[in-house]
């Protein structure tokens, strides 16, 4: 059998325990439900692609454009989660929001714009660029997958499509940026998840492919650093005032890193830069080289 239509292997050791999540999942969902969903997704892709290959068609990854294949993954995830949950049902309204609705909440399990909870699903090949038609508050599930596009290998020798991470988090409207449609363009505006939202999702991962774990953790650190950087001046000034004494950048980094979910070395350069800006703004003074105090 061609390698690219083999059933992808699923490593259950990537499962995150419920007690290790930053907060409990909604609707009595458990991390294992999402693991079973990935297992079902792999079986679906395998079954469909074997049949296509038997008829001399390309596999789905080549037949569908990127958006079409992501849409297929997303719909399969919605079906899978609804199958394993007694509290959620598939939204039967075409392109309705959210994808999964609380059971027995809407007539016919159908609504264009639900406002009573639920779970929205996004499937993406990107590890950062997660978008929606509008900024929304609620629970989101992002399924990050990877298609082997190595052009140095024949298509039949490439790896089957793999899910790299399944992430679940509750996002606020402020976790999104909004880019309105350009004048004269038919395309609608686009909402993108900001670093603060991406950090929430990474921290809320319920399953991560063990081979991707290092990249996942690095991306989580990067997002948290970006969030810290956005508010670094206020954070550093408050820490300096709370300490009640002069301090060095390294000392302040030790104080402010843990609340941000980071290590001191992750934020030291940002703390140093923030101190420089605070000195120029007149909020902090340098009493001797490398030592600062709040004014």
Image: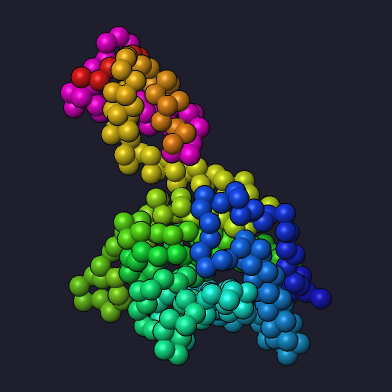
Q: Residue 173 or 48: which is nearer the viewer?
A: 173
Q: Is residue 99 a member of the stretch shown in magenta?
A: no
Q: Residue 5 or 93: which is nearer the viewer?
A: 93
Overall secondary structure of the magenta stretch? helix
Q: Is residue 179 left or right of residue 96?
A: left
Quarter of the N terminus within the rendering: bottom right
Quarter of the C terminus within the rendering: top left
Measuring from the top left, give residue 25's x and y in whole percent. Answer: 53, 60
Boundaries of the magenta span: 260-289
Q: How is the image coloured?
A: rainbow
* Picture residue at 66% right of the left edge, 82% below the top: 58
Measuring from the top left, give residue 149's x and y in whole percent. Answer: 61, 65
* Picture residue at 52% right of the left edge, 68% below the top: 27
Q: Residue 240 or 220: which is nearer the viewer?
A: 240
Q: Please, which residue is most extreme toward the right here? A: 1
Give the quadrant of residue 134. bottom left
Measuring from the top left, give residue 44's x and y in whole percent. Answer: 68, 79
* Picture residue at 55% right of the left edge, 44% below the top: 218
Q: Is residue 275 a member of the stretch shown in magenta?
A: yes
Residue 223 vs 276, above or below: the answer is: below
């Amino acid at each position: 059998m061609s390698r690219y239509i083999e059933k992808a292997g699923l490593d259950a050791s990537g499962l995150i325990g419920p007690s290790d999540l930053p907060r409990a999942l909604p609707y009595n969902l458990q991390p294992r439900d999402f693991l079973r969903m990935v297992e079902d997704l792999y079986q679906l892709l395998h079954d469909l692609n074997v049949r296509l290959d038997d008829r001399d068609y390309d596999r789905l990854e080549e037949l569908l454009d990127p958006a079409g294949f992501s849409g297929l993954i997303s719909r399969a995830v919605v079906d899978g989660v609804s199958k394993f949950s007694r509290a959620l049902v598939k939204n039967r309204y075409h392109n309705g929001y959210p994808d999964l609705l609380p059971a027995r909440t809407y007539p016919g399990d159908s609504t264009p714009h639900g406002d009573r909870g639920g779970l929205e699903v996004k499937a993406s090949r990107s590890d950062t660029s997660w978008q929606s038609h509008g900024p929304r508050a609620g629970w989101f599930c992002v399924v990050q997958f990877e298609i082997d596009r190595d052009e140095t290998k024949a298509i039949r020798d490439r790896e089957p499509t793999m899910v790299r991470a399944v992430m679940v988090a509750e996002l606020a409207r402020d976790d999104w940026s909004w880019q309105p449609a350009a004048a004269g363009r038919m395309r609608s505006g686009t909402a993108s998840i900001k670093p603060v939202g991406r950090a929430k999702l990474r921290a809320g991962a319920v399953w991560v492919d063990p081979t991707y774990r290092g990249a996942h953790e690095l991306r989580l650190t990067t997002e948290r650093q970006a969030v810290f950087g956005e508010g670094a001046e206020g954070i550093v000034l408050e820490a300096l005032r709370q300490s009640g004494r002069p301090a060095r950048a390294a000392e302040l980094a030790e104080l402010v890193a843990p609340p941000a979910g980071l290590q001191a070395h992750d934020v030291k350069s940002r703390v140093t830069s923030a101190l420089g800006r605070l000195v120029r703004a007149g909020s902090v003074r340098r009493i001797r080289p490398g030592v600062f105090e709040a004014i």
